[in-house]
Image: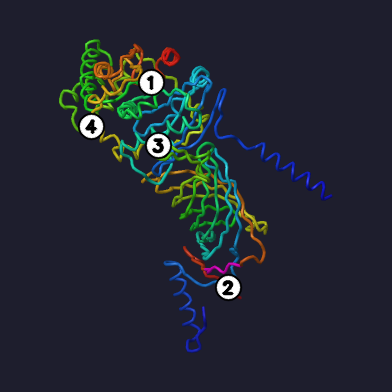
Amino acid sequence: MSKMKTYYLWFICLILISCHKEDFNSSGLVEDHFFMKNDKQNMPVLVAGNIDSRKMLVIIHGGPGGNSWDYRNSYVKSYVESDVALVYWDQRYSGQSQGNGGSYHITTFREDLRKLLQLLKAKYGQDKEIFLFAHSWGGFIAPYFLSDPQNLALVNGWIQIGGAHNYRMNDSLTREMLIFYAQEELDKERNKEDWYEILEWCNNNGFEGRENAGQLNQFAHKAEGLIEAVNEPNFDFSEILANNQAFLTNYFNMINSAIKAVDEPTYSTPITDVLHKINCPTFLLWGKYDFVCPPELAIDIEKNIGSSDVTKIIFNASGHSPMVNEEHLFWNEVKKWVVER
Amino acid sequence: LIEMPFLNKSSVVSNKWLMIGIMVFWGVDSSCQSFDYQAKTNIRASYNSAIIYPGFKLGLERPYSVTKFERYKRNKVKTHFIEKNLTFSLGMYHHTDFHSHCYLQGEWVRRKQRKSGFYRENTYGLGLSRAFLDGPSFSVNNQGEVKKIPLAGVNYGLFSIGGSWGYNFDMKFDKPFAIFLKTTGILYFPHSKFVNLRPTLELGGQYQIKGFWEANPTYKTKIKGKKKYRPQN
């Protein structure tokens, strides 16, 4: 009987050992979920996709207060993760990050990104090629990070999608673009009431100041929806459930970021002045109808960047998020560019 | 009504009517020795979910006050009980890829128990919690060295408000258990120097263990409405 007990004990131990999951997978299609803790914030990270490709796209999401899981839809899972590995990282005070406190200054966001890249290299190998995939607010964090030569050394390329590298310039361009399209659309007698409201506000207000910037941002999102040429993105609630998203945490972090005005220091940190320090391959992807971060921002990067390897694509049926407006075209261009580098 | 020796019979009768008058207009609080509802200490167990993410909750409920309300209307009397108790519980839910949130909670409960057995309650709670991260956690120092953090998580204070509907089998069937459905909103803090909210849904039961930590709540009766005086034979 005691012999039987010993066998049972060994059997249970064997099951427990065999159930132990490795934190990181080193080959094939991976789906590793882990957290990175820095300065009182626990930031979730998901590495999903083909790690054998040696290419890792680190998503620096929009916001501030957005989340990276929104970029992971069924198309991305099926057609992008099969070719490259995507790194979904929720920034501090954003998405599903958890913690009691910690700094929310832009310098800490930059520090988080550096530590994330160091963690990825330590766990997946120094041979991995890292590309920053920055969208909107992430488009400020990426060049801000890359303007430091030590950080630049960790990265193989920068993909900028509708990014806000210069907030002041951004607000000014948004106002100009709204006025231009409002007049054009009113001439064509389309959505007259909405465009008239936008035009009237823009003619009576400037772009300076937080209040004006907030109103311009609201109008920019509204304007995108009024342009017929912009492809309507597909929204599938089941994909949010499939990603196990904590909706309320996303929501409270978004509200919190707005209350704390996380992006306030960006106004005194114009990245245009330091773009000459960035010499890595750069890929600029913009929606023609991006009122939130107008395409002229891409021209500013083209003019001032230190890199000689710069490619720009404008998507004619897209607004602020070409990755959902023209999904197929967008991801094909990204994959092609990354594979070529 | 107590018959006083210094009062004659007619004055006792008029005193009776005076007392009834008071009862009619203001209601009466009185201590009750023979009460037809006995609140007891209960143990509670429930399936506790953060809507779609599973968990459990175990607790102990201890009543400290029971008030019987009698409402007289057109020769009919409607009775219900307001039971006040304190509940101490340990709860948790597991949200995949996010966290396993474990919490210790004390709740103040106000229950309206009907004679039919159905009840509803409001709860207000305070507690402490730890959200264990669902996944390995790492820190990186300034030299780029990576360290794994064991049992990584975040501690929170929490405040909760809930509502519950249940059926107490003790009222009609003399069985020592009840079943309930409860919704709670848990506000936990500080979450990124702010707050976070988590709704939970519980489906569970409670059971009175005979002789276990006997509760000694205060019993009161409150009468409202016009109680018709019927002289005793």
Q: CA distance from mark 4 to mark 3?
A: 25 Å
Q: SS at mark 1? A: strand
User: Tag 1 or tag 4, which sits nearer the N-term?
Assistant: 1
Q: Which residue is mark 1?
A: A157
> Residue type at mark 4?
Tyr
4 or 1: mark nearer the eye: 1
Which chain is home to disc 4? A
Task: Decide which of A76, B149 is in the foreground and name it.
Answer: B149
Q: Position of residue A74 (x, y in %)?
A: 51, 21
Residue of label 4: A267
- Given residues B89 and A124, the one toward you in this image is A124
Label 3 sits on residue: A251
* Same chain check for tags 2 and 4: no
Amino acid at circle 1: Gly
Residue bearing mark 2 = B33
Span of residues in magenta: B214-219
